[in-house]
Image (cartoon, grey):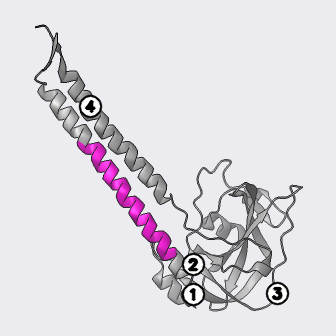
Amino acid sequence: MKRRWHRPGLFAVVLTALGTAAFVSLGLWQLRRGAEKEQLLAAFARTAQIAPVDLAEARRQADARHFPHVRVEGRFDAEHAYLLDDQIRGQRTGVVVYGVFEPLEGGPALLVNRGFLPRRDSRRIEVPPLAEGPLVLSGLYAPPPGSGLRLGGNALPKQSAWPKTTIYLDTGEISADIGQRVDDRVLLLDPDPASGFERVWTPELMPPERHRGYAFQWFSFAAAAIVIFLVLHWRKSPS
């Protein structure tokens, strides 16, 4: 028995063509997204080296692709602070500490990411005290971290002791919790080895390498669709 080409039906041709086109399109989209993420990471790194602007200007500049380097004067609210729990840095777990900062120029309060503190021998984490009095802070004016699954809902009203612990950061819930308006963005403080906190900032996004991996998968599906089509229609026939 020899292999011969069997004319495929219209349905098989259309299905294979549409499937292949869709897989290739998705692969190209993932490649574009990976390139966009690389540009965003580069812009994020460049911004940290640029001279800071005031908060009002940062609010005007802010968009999904812009993380202004900001300088803001004000004071911390000594009564309110939040611990974003279950955070991972390398092989360590810990918390990210947020303070509530009241800008001197007025407007909504600003959540300040003071940095990461690892858990050591006990569950309790000693948080370095806040500086008192008027301060000038500088850092990146960026969106808050993604919330992911909000298991258990809003836990803030159930807590009476400060700092309060949460597994996700919602500026609306914090605004209701402290009884004052809170900015939709947060301040990622510039690194300071003397602060006691770890501050290594990157945007909350899927890394470019993962986009390229997904692109490879979609292109593989396209190739598989073509191979299956050929195998099914290049088959043995009676002599």
Callout 3: helix, strand or loop? loop
Residue that label 2 marks: 141
Q: Between 1 and 71, which is closer to the camera in this rendering?
A: 1
Q: Kindly check if marks 3 and 2 are in contact, taking CB atoms under 8 A apart as contact.
A: no
Q: At label 3, which amino acid type do we have? A: Glu
Callout 1: helix, strand or loop? helix
Callout 2: helix, strand or loop? strand
Q: At label 2, which amino acid type do we have? A: Tyr
Residue appearing at x 41%, y 60% in the figure: 34
Q: At label 4, which amino acid type do we have? A: Val
Q: Quadrant of the N terminus?
A: top left
Distance from disc 1 to disc 4, alpha carbons, whole Å, reads: 57 Å
Q: At label 1, which amino acid type do we have? A: Leu
Q: Kindly check if marks 2 and 1 are in contact, taking CB atoms under 8 A apart as contact.
A: yes
Residue that label 1 marks: 55
Q: Residues within 10 Å of mark 2 (few under 14, many from 20)?
A: many
**Does 76 lie within the magenta span?**
no
